[in-house]
Amino acid sequence: MSEKNREGKRAARERLAAEREKQKAAEKRRRTLIVGASVVCVLGLAAVIGVVAANSGGDGDSDTASGPVSAPQGAAGTDKLAIPVGQDTAKSTLTIWEDFRCPACKAFEDSYRTTLHELTDAGKLKVEYHLVTLIDSNMGGSGSLRAGNAAGCAQDAGKFRDYHDVLYENQPEETDDAFSKNSKLLDLAGKVDGLTTDTFTSCVNGGKHDTWIQKSYKKFQDDKLSGTPTVILNGKTLDLNSLTPQKLKEQVEAADK
């Protein structure tokens, strides 16, 4: 491996670690404010200090999470909360809990996208994506929910992976809730061949999968997961500070033998 490639991978790991630390710091500030105001605490990135299943209706995290749930076509798992990418016959399963507004999730995707595509296309790995609204909960807004719903609509159209990649490639700054606008999400859909249809547009504008996203976030809270991205390979949570794309590839290929 060239020195340039080594430097690039080291820089990517450092960016991912830095984004996780930013999330932890933001949640620490939020917990301090919440305790001072004597209100209910929420799930943090560094520690679980309590859970709430809802936010205000304007943020898309209302009590409708307990109502009818419309899962995207092909959703997997006992509760149909995962969007699978890859072949069911793959010997390894990578579970990813992510939030489309999360900078650390973008850093992970930027570093691992090529490797994940390679392994899934080769039939060696199945990835199960769980979409949550952690940033909406921590910072306000509804971009996590709106983008998650749009990704579910893309899954209905058989275009999830392509649209998933487009969302991360065009992720706004964490404080910019640009994904809360359906018009923005529909505009980005134009970057995926064949995705922009009347059905997709209606699905996005109608929030067809909102309650499914909210249920997924509640599962994230109930399972006391520590933050996004949470990445689990064959049941084992991975340490993203020490993981590299090559190490992940080696683990998956070893299991495939």
Image: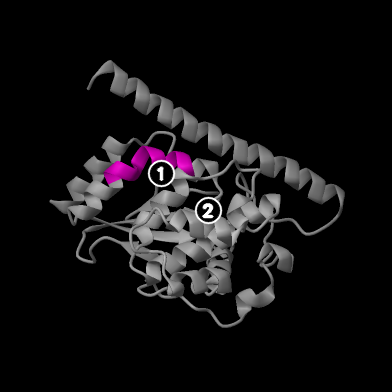
Q: Position of residue 187 (x, y in %)?
A: 49, 56
Q: Residues within 10 Å of mark 1 (few under 14, many from 20)?
A: some
Q: Which residue corresponds to the image point at 19% horizontal and 65% vertical from the top-left? A: 89
Q: Position of residue 91 (x, y in %)?
A: 21, 59
Tell me which corner region of the image, top left, top right, bottom left or bottom right, holds residue 9. Answer: top left
How far is disc 1 from disc 2 in space, using C-alphas?
11 Å
Q: 37 or 11: nearer the eye?
A: 11
Q: Is residue 198 left or right of residue 52?
A: left
Q: Is residue 68 left or right of residue 72?
A: right
Q: Secondary structure at mark 1?
A: helix
The magenta-colored residue range is 106-115
Q: Is residue 100 left or right of residue 238?
A: right
Q: Position of residue 102 (x, y in %)?
A: 55, 46
Instruction: Examine the rendered structure and indicate whether residue 1 appears above or below residue 179.
Output: above
Magenta run includes residue 194: no
User: Would you name the residue on which mark 2 appears?
Assistant: 99
User: Would you name the residue on which mark 1 appears?
Assistant: 109
Q: Position of residue 37 (x, y in %)?
A: 87, 52
Q: Which residue corresponds to the image point at 70% horizontal and 54% vertical from the top-left? A: 140
Q: Which residue corresponds to the image point at 61% horizontal and 58% vertical from the top-left? A: 181
The overriding secondary structure of the stretch rendered in magenta is helix
Q: Secondary structure at mark 2?
A: loop
Residue type at numbered disc 1: Glu
